[in-house]
Image (cartoon, rainbow, N blue to C red):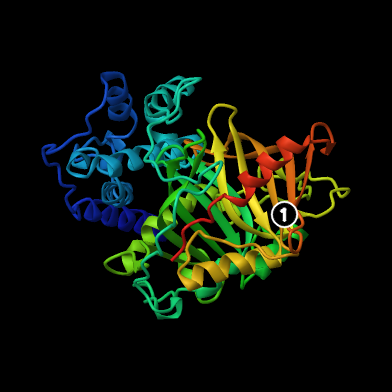
Amino acid sequence: MRILVKIFAAAIVVFAAIQLVRPSIPANPATAELQAPEPVKNILEKDCYSCHSNQKRLSWFDQIQPGYWLVRHDILTAREHLNFSTIGTKPAAAQKAALYEAVNMIQLGAMPLPQFAALHPDAKVSAEELATLKAYLSPWPSSGSQPAMPAGGAKADARSGEVPAQQRLLASLAAVRPVANGLQFDPAFEGWKLISTTERGDNNTFRFILGNDIAIRAIQSGNITPWPDGARMAKIAWQRAAGSDGLLYPGKFVQVELMVKDSHAYKGTDGWGWGRWRGLNLEPYGKDAGFVKECTGCHEPVRRNDFVYTLPIAAITTTRQEVVNSRAATLPGSLPWQPLAWGAITMSVDPTTRETATLFGNDAALNAVRSAHESGAGRQVAYPAGAVLALVTWGQRDDPHWFGARIPDAPRSVEFLEIASGALPAKYRKFAGAGLTEVAADEDAAAQRTRFLLNLDPVELP
């Protein structure tokens, strides 16, 4: 009994002593707050400012050690990632991106932190409050209108003059410098197969998500939770540009990001190596290795999907929802070719019909694109006999993992163009409707679509 009393007394002494170890939590005045409508600011102040601002808001039980240390750590970490008291010092685009990320964290249940919300129920974001934030950020124009875009998309009918050769700032992709965490650039990424495409309305970009052979085999077998070691994914982004035909096309190249799975080499970053290279000169992103915190923090909400936001287009079934995009993969085996197994050349979006299309090519077509690219001819591609192009058009749906993005939905049509030899005309075929059955096209319509497919500009790549 005396031993228990001594233990209890010692515990009280220790408890009292640690109350004196109280590092401060800075509480500075706001210097540049977010400029937003009052209802939006009210929601952010109520639900986010406890951690993501310079204000110091502690409940009485937050003051008790050792809980105080944990709360202090969470607050300082949160401020480092997003601080609404200073966010106004950032460029408008960076402020907007931070808000989109915050909304996605909320809708995926990652914010506020579950342990924080359990003790601070007033910090929970209601469905009505989330709807208010989404309405404020909504990137999509009203029906019948189209966002203002820079010109520069593909020509729908004919090419107008020569396309200048793209300036190459690097003699070889192999010369690209690694990012600060040591991840090497992979010059083979341009030859990887398409996993999915994304239209990002939040930052006006189009994206190809490509995977190496290991990643593609993992998708086909459903072995993606977790992804196997050796899987590599590239996310390539271009600015959206308006074409003369009313469609939106990939414009200026923005960046390429890599995710490399190696559960041993990257054990400290969730088993993934992360890297980003910006501009046609592929400048490594990040001043130091600490940039990886941006990647791991952003991908934390999709931990159950092994930290991958993308829903691969795959004709497989899983026991969990929203792991693969099987709806977009429903191309019948009766088609003369299976374009999803080919490489991607470019994409487009029709904002009026809310459709997205990707142009695929067989090996002969892709080799012609690469030759034009390497020779400096840029977008002037001469497809040889034996080349086959396939334009797959899908409806669009909202990306369930990222507010502000849209991904392919069920396919609407598949158009094939088989390049013949000599003076023979290219053979055009279209499959559409229920089950994607072949649709007869008259001579004029076939000729028009043939010109359209041949004049689609390949995406700009480093």
Answer with left or right where residue 134 lies relative to residue 422.
left
- Residue 112, given in percent of the width and then of the height, sits at 41, 38
Q: Is 274 on the left-hand or right-hand side of 317?
A: left
Task: Using residue 290 as the reference point, say whether residue 238 is left or right of it.
Answer: right
**Which residue occupies the foreground of this view, 2 or 250?**
250
Residue marked by disc 1: 340
Report whether residue 1 is seen. Answer: no
The residue under the point 19% across, 40% down is 54
Q: Nearer the viewer, residue 399 or 427?
A: 427
119 or 55: nearer the eye?
Answer: 55
Q: Nearer the viewer, residue 170 or 218?
A: 170
Q: Amino acid at mark 1?
A: Leu
Quarter of the image that includes the N terminus: bottom left
Where in the figure is residue 307, as x and y percent of width and height? 54, 55
Using the rendered image of the protein, determine whether residue 410 is visible from the camera's viewpoint.
Answer: yes
* Quarter of the picture holding the C terminus: bottom left
